Image (cartoon, rainbow, N blue to C red):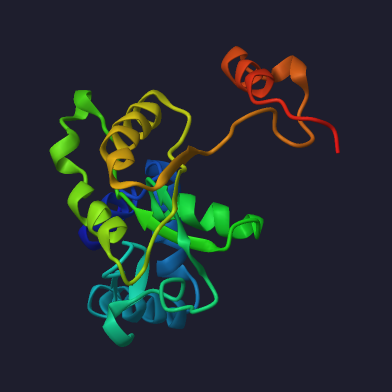
Amino acid sequence: MLPDKLQALVRLLARLPGVGDKTAQRYALFLCTADPAIARELGLALAGLEAEVGPCTRCGHVADRSAAGGLCAICADPRRDGSVLCVVGRVQDLLSIERSAAYRGRYFVLGRLLAPLEGIRAEDLPLERLKALLRDPARPVTEVLLATPPSVDGEATALLLAEELRPLGARVTRLASGVPHGGDLEFADPVTIGRAIAHRRGVE
């Protein structure tokens, strides 16, 4: 019912995270029937994406390839606290932490988590690059904050990282978890409530 070119576009869009077949078809039809300038601009942006944007050479966040040293805006910012390094699984996690405005240190993006069922093992993680940052005397790191998600894979990754990084001398901490702000205890899962109790603190 659709031209081959359009069907190919639908299949490509459906491979994006969170996009199903119906949503992909809706996007494709919009691009075909809306202002042609939108499709042209989108095509140009996608065509230049790989050549112009890539991982930061230091932390793995996305960076402008033309930037000095291939560094992202965070690594290039001299106002950042280089003594604290936050390890996250994905760039999306980094962006979530940045939106909180509660952290002013630097980051390291693993790009993946331990997932034995998917064939992702310890040797598939960029552990040596991470260790090299901690060994760099020009940028001494005193604390490594593990901010992997509170999932089975995230917890396994955090345990592995703690074991690998502690011998390097930096203090290893874990992102706390608890009841979300504005949330209702009735709908919180037992693990979340348990951690909220275990990590309780005094009222200030």
Q: Position of residue 189 (x, y in %)?
A: 62, 16
Quadrant in the rendering for residue 98: bottom right
Q: Position of residue 57 (x, y in %)?
A: 26, 70
- Identity of the residue drawn at 71% across and 18% down: 187
- Identity of the residue drawn at 48% across and 29% down: 150
In the picture shown, does residue 112 fall above or below 119? below
Is 140 placed left or right of 173 in the picture? left
Q: Position of residue 203 (x, y in %)?
A: 85, 32
In the picture shown, does residue 113 fall above or below 196? below
Is 202 placed left or right of 98 in the picture? right
Q: Nearer the viewer, residue 172 or 119?
A: 172
The outermost residue toward the top is 190
- Identity of the residue drawn at 28% across and 79% down: 70
In the picture shown, does residue 152 fall above or below 177? above
Question: Is residue 164 visible in the rendered structure shown here?
Answer: yes
- Where's the C terminus, which quadrant? top right
Question: Is residue 65 visible in the rendered structure shown here?
Answer: no
